[in-house]
Amino acid sequence: MNRDEFAPRDRELEDEHLPQAIARRLAMHRRHGYVGDAVLGAVDGCVTTFAIVAAAVGGGFSQIVIIVLGFANLLADGFSMAVSNYLGTKSERQEVERARQTERQHIEAIPAGEREEIRQIFARKGFSGEVLERVVDVITSNPNLWVDTMLTEELGLQLDGPRPVQAGVATFLAFVIVGLIPLAPFVVPMINADQRFIASATATAVAFFSVGVIKGKILERALVRSGLETLLIGGMAATLAYLVGAWLRHAYGAS
């Protein structure tokens, strides 16, 4: 490949590193996205709902029982997962606030010691001499910047984390929307009764793969590999649920 073939990519990289582009990118990184919460909810919703469907079919239950169990699990488990995400996210934000108050108290009580911590933090990054002292002076001259630096550099905390309510809502909506896919064939009257489980399995497999591709795109991984990985994990969970249902049906003589 010659140099000309790389020229478009080189120009794109240059454009991405213009001052205005860098400023926009840094501003975007400070805002937390909720796609990850949605992907997590979507995967769990699809896996757990289809596992319920597979177990019920394996156990020989009727269509109405499958629908009742499926929707009960969809709403209850989706709500439980959303609440768990909400509480976990809220706890993380509370931890940051507690640490912020503690650092402020330390700065007020022993400013010299906290200043020395800043000095050693940036000395480990390679700063020394007058440059190091200038960095320390600039940071410690601004109380808010001083505290934020201690939180990120000393404690390794994330200052701009997700908001609890938005994280919980994103999880719940994705859980319910994608979790409906395995149940859809059982509530659509035009689908033949004997083909409902096949239709459910096919639709669920497509959903697993699609969610995996989306996850791969977010994590910048190989899309097909990520899709197949999610499909494999979901398929294993569904197969296990089906086998357990079939075994219990055989063991207890269910008809």
Image: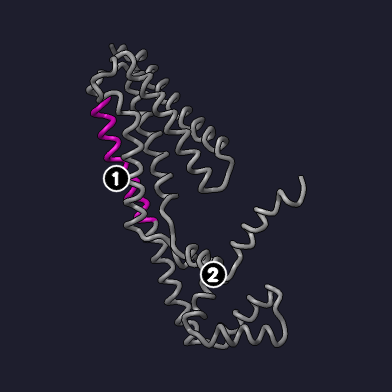
Question: Does residue 152 lie above or below 115 as drawn?
Answer: above
The amino acid at mark 2 is: Gln
Instruction: Please tell me how crowded label 1 is: few (under 14), some (14-19), or many (20+) other residues with Cα within 10 Å.
Output: some
Left or right relative to 239: residue 252: left
Question: Residue 102's spot in the image, x, y percent?
Answer: 45, 77
State the residue at coordinates (44%, 28%): 205
Instruction: Give the main secondary structure, helix, strand or loop, of the magenta stretch.
Output: helix
- Quarter of the image holding residue 105? bottom left
The amino acid at mark 1 is: Phe
In the picture, the disc for residue 26 is none
User: Which quadrant is the N terminus positioned in?
Assistant: top right
Question: Residue 60's spot in the image, x, y percent?
Answer: 31, 16
Q: Identify residue for label 2.
A: 20
**Secondary structure state at the residue bearing disc 1:** helix
Residues at marks 1 and 2, CA–CA distance in whole angstroms: 42 Å
Foreground label between 1 and 2: 2
Left or right relative to 63: residue 247: right
- Quarter of the image holding residue 200? top left
Question: Residue 228's spot in the image, x, y percent?
Answer: 53, 32
Q: Give the range drawn in magenta.
A: 66-88
Question: Does residue 216 lie above or below 166 as drawn?
Answer: above
**Secondary structure state at the residue bearing disc 2:** helix
State the residue at coordinates (34%, 55%): 86
Q: How is the image coloured?
A: one colour
- Quarter of the image holding residue 242? top left
Instruction: Specify whether residue 86 is painted magenta.
Output: yes
Q: Identify residue for label 1.
A: 79
Left or right relative to 119: residue 73: left
State the residue at coordinates (31%, 34%): 180
State the residue at coordinates (44%, 30%): 206
Question: Does residue 210 lie above or below 138 as drawn?
Answer: above
As rendered, which of 189 and 246 lies closer to the eye?
Answer: 189
